[in-house]
Image (spheres, helix red, strand yellow):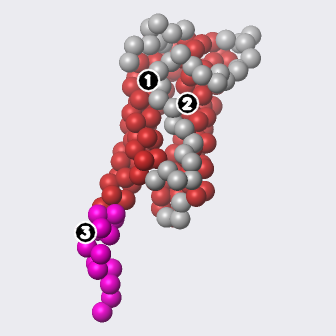
Amino acid sequence: MDLKKYTLEDLLLAAMKSEIESRTVYTTIADKVKNGLLKDKLKFLAKEEEKHRSFIEQVYKAKFPKKKITIPKTTPVPLPPLVMPDEDTPLGSILRNAMVAEQAAYEFYQKLSEQFTKNDAMIRNTLSYFADMELQHYKILEIEKESMDRFEEADVYWPMVHAGP
């Protein structure tokens, strides 16, 4: 992902937009799922996205103190959106899309951290840490997706597996 053609302002606004959208999706899905462990994991991810947004907002305010933060409806930065699923979207598709978004966020934060010099070492290191966290988010979603797929396979291939004596 090449971010050199974008302004720092565009990159920070895109990051905030992405974190806001991700938080909204994770919160909405968490409110709908019945599996308590998955619900807790999604709420955790939503809180993480909120923390990321808050930090990016602080960086924006420090770099652009005279500008008001206005989150754009669209952004030129190529981050895949994590869009709100409709009622009929299978949970597996939602998790797969979230995994794609988390992978892209990992790459984005890796490259964004490179935009900051040694003078901004704290910002650079925090963004690098965010990249690692996004990869952890990906792994959380991947584990849940694989678990769900195994459950569905058991239901399809061995329909009597849950039958009692």
Location of mark 2 (residue): 18
Query: What crowding class fits label 1: few (fewer than 14 Cα within 10 Å), some (14-19), or many (20 or more)?
Result: many
The answer to whether 46 appears left or right of 158 in the picture is right
Q: Which mark is residue 141?
A: none
Q: Which is more N-terminal, label 3 or label 2?
A: 2
Label 2 sits on what residue type? Ser
Task: Kindly report the distance in space between the C-alpha atoms of the residues bearing marks 2 and 3.
Answer: 39 Å
Question: Is 38 located above or below residue 120 in the figure?
Answer: below
**Which amino acid type is shown beneath numbered disc 3?**
Tyr
Residue 47 placement: quadrant: top right
| Comes first in the chain, label 3 or label 1 | 1
Q: Element under label 2?
A: helix
**Sequence-wise, which precedes: disc 1 or disc 2?**
2
Instruction: Identify the magenta region.
Output: 151-165
Residue on which the image places disc 1: 108
Query: x and y percent of residue 24 in the render?
Result: 61, 42
> From this viewpoint, which residue is outermost toward the left?
157
The residue nearer to you, when weighing 39 against 52, is 39
Q: Nearer the viewer, residue 129 or 47?
A: 47
Residue 159 in the magenta stretch? The answer is yes
Return the x and y of residue 125 as percentages of the image width and height.
45, 23
Q: Is residue 146 magenta?
A: no
Residue 7 appears in the picture as rendered: yes
